Amino acid sequence: MKLKKVVTIFGAGSWGTAIAKNISENGYRVRIWAKEKNVVDSIIRKRENKIFLPGVKLPSSIYPTNSLDTNLFDSDFLIFSIPTQFIRESLLLMKEMISKDSILINTSKGIEQSSMKPIYSIFKEILPRVSRRYVTISGPSFAYDVAKKLPTSVTLASANSLLLPSAMKIFENQNFKTYTSKDVVGVELGGSLKNVIAIGAGILDGIKSSESTKAAFITRGLKEIRTLSKILGAKNTTFMGLSGIGDLMLTAYGEQSRNRSLGIYIGKGKKIKLILSSTKTVAEGFYTSKAIYELTRKYKIHSPIIESIYRILYRNSNPRNIVKNLLKNDGIADI
């Protein structure tokens, strides 16, 4: 595969911007599309995304734009870093401009609330034969850590293993290591569902629960998402890797975690609508929690952890009920 050394990223939030910086420092020209005009203006004038990634200087080889010009789609890779709930409308808008040979990389994490579908399924529904040209990336990786060149490891997954060496090449350097997998479903579900558990972990921090309680909660939460993911076609072993337990640990304990922060505020008694309206960034777990709850009901999976988080977020349940549900003896083995 002969590369032009040009990559396009759709979405200039904190993660899209951090990825752009990493790839550009690997010697690629990076075109980055942002919906927000002030983001583009900020990058052009100050070489900094002051809205979503302030304090990080961006190389001159990053070219921001608001326009969906056809030249954006003439790149080695089209990378999508768009919030999950907006991916469908974005793909429908771009569908006619995306070549049938374009290699697509997803960097987002979540489940579409309206359809209860993971991101790969959305791509598959809109773009024909996408499986032979689709890659997803996930793992324990905060945007600021990557932007500051702190050592980070993630998983790249594709059903087409021939895509992985060239995909690895654009991301990898001495600070950013990639591992590979064929389990696209498992890698995406691990990155999506851990956000829900991280909200619950944050709620426990907000109500000042013990570390022992939090560890038990996260472990039992992992059991529930593994059970659901197996039904959806994921491999169980995937959840023991970077895109599973690795990402869960970071999101449930990390100070930069948006999902954990949302949970902390809820645990402290703040209203959810006020929390969501006061931030520019998206806590994907809020939207995914409703979808995952509906999936557990659809497949009749006993999931007290997932149900308790859903009821707190959408049914005004008392946050302290999260501990009561953890302590229920459901008779299910600890595996």
Image (cartoon, rainbow, N blue to C red):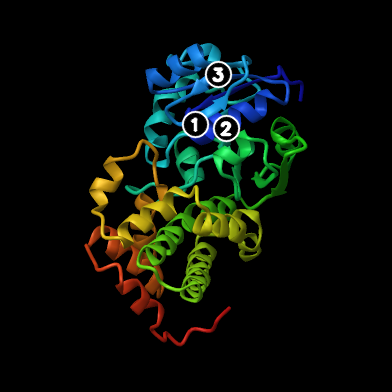
Q: Amino acid at mark 2?
A: Ala
Q: Which residue is mark 3?
A: 73
| 106 vs 316, nearest the viewer | 316
Q: Would you say 321 lies left or right of 25 here?
A: left
Query: Which mark is in front, 2 or 3?
Result: 2
Q: Which mark is residue 18?
A: 2
Name above or below for residue 248 compared with residue 143. Answer: below
Report if the CB atoms under discs 2 and 1 are less than 8 Å apart: yes
Cα distance between the residues tagged 2 and 1: 8 Å
User: Considering the image in quadrants, where does the N terminus appear?
Assistant: top right
Of callouts 2 and 1, which one flags the residue occurring earlier in the amino acid sequence? 2
Position of residue 3 measured from the top left corner of the image (x, y, whole percent) = 73, 21
Position of residue 274 measured from the top left corner of the image (x, y, whole percent) = 24, 46
* Location of residue 201 by image quarter: bottom left
Cα distance between the residues tagged 1 and 3: 25 Å
Q: Which residue is mark 1?
A: 53
